[in-house]
Amino acid sequence: MMRALKPNWASMNLAYWASGSGFCFLLVVFLSLVLFGCAAGPRYTPPKPNAPLRWHTKLQRGLNAETPDPKALARWWTTLKDPILSSLEERAVKGNLDIKEALARIREARALRGVEKARLFPTIDIKGSAQEKRTSAYSTEKPVGGKRRGEESKLYKVGFDSRWELDIFGGINRSVEAAQAELEATKEELRDVLVSLSAEVALNYVEVRTYQARLAAARVNMEAQRHIYELNLSRYRAGLIDELAVQQSRYVLENTEAQIPALETGLERALNRLAVLLGEKPGALHQELEKPKPIPVPPVKVAVGIPADTLRQRPDVRRAERELAAATARIGAAKAELYPKFNLSGTIGLESVSTAHLWEWVSRTSDFGFNIFWKIFHAGELRQNVKVQTARQRQAFIQYESTVLNALEEVENALVAYAKEQQRLESLKAAAKAASLAYDIAWDRYKAGLVDFTDVLDAERSLQLYQDKLAESEGAVTSNLVRLYKALGGGWRYMEPLAERSEK
């Protein structure tokens, strides 16, 4: 009865030794495949992003469509003219742990590419063995010379084994191509981390200076309110005013004091986060940044270029394109499994029953062969794997298109936020100035007895509110500029060499 075939048995493994017509036939087949064989799978063509000719957002408030200076974009934080910020950026790229992790992933990807490239070359192994064998005296039916004796044998071997898979259909080359693309994608991932790091350092630094400005304004207002409360208290005790003005001035003072702990908490968080970004322990920067400094002021003009420039500059778009290239190459590697594999193998060595004759020329052995291996029946596994890789390539392409759209969206939002916050800042400056003048007028009239304390109270509340909003808006303008530079993909060209040198 014929035995049923199993899928893992259904393969063809033909070995022709170097003799006779079989060798000639295989030689003809081999030469034909070498001359006419081609790499399996689709040939990769980088996609062209569908970028608009210009930004949808109207460029105003210093924004212009000029091409950014590559050197200025690479070190965009220097446009804020804050030496402390520049120092923090330099220190962050050397100490940040996310950078170190990304560099380790690059080393891993580079090693994996080396593993795939090694498959293109023959393998050579050395082997050696020494065996001593003795059989039982009762392993034979008749004794020798009237006595039963066991047989002893010795065998010594040493030699080289070699094997080479000929990449006729390009499966190995496609795997190398995929590994190379993955390595390049990992490099772009590092650059993306550098872009985010430079922006996060600047954002947290601006946040520190913003909290310091808000705290300074709150403390100044608190002292002024304390003076008013004490003045009202003395006037009340002298019988000049009623208790209502005293209590009003007191709750204004207490309300301002209640705001300070929240501002101090925000300042502490920003300082701690900044320290961690630099790879240092929380609290490491408190003494260094303890002295308040002005919020960095953006430059008068900012060049943003055109959308196509941004898409070429952004590491996340470049990484998505490289991941698409890797997915395309994996289709070829999967398709190559549908075709036969060709191997050259050989062994050269020495063999002897004694070590005395092992190294003699006549003890040499050799074995050479040409092998074909073809997976004939695997229940559709190989073709399904091709479909899997094709579907993954489609996913990678959709991810690339999504990354392009998200990049354009991020820049458009940053352009709007930067321009509109400047407009808001101008209005807040005018409002704060008017509130300060109104407060002075109300206070002079109150001291002259022309108005009651309610007018002073309203003017004081408005002044404090607008001063706090003004400090917030000044920080928001600079923060929005930082987000704009991040959206443009700035920072990595300068930081990348520093990060690589820090790991050597």
Image: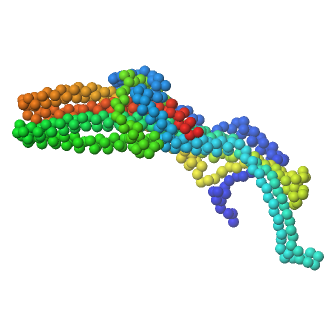
Near-viewer residue (7 or 475)? 475
For the C terminus, the quadrant is top right
Q: From the viewer's perspective, tell me whether residue 97 is left or right of residue 129.
A: left
Q: Position of residue 439 (x, y in %)?
A: 16, 30
Q: Residue furthest bottom?
A: 146
Answer with the quarter of the image where residue 34 lies. top right
Q: Residue at x 42, y 37 (%)?
A: 201
Q: Residue at x 67, y 57 (%)?
A: 9
| For residue 60, above or below residue 198 | above
Q: Residue furthest right?
A: 145
Q: Residue furthest left?
A: 239
| For residue 184, above or below residue 298 | below
Q: Position of residue 328 (x, y in %)?
A: 56, 39
Residue 176 appearing in the image: yes
Near-viewer residue (318 or 503)? 503
For the N terminus, the quadrant is bottom right
Near-viewer residue (351 or 233)? 233
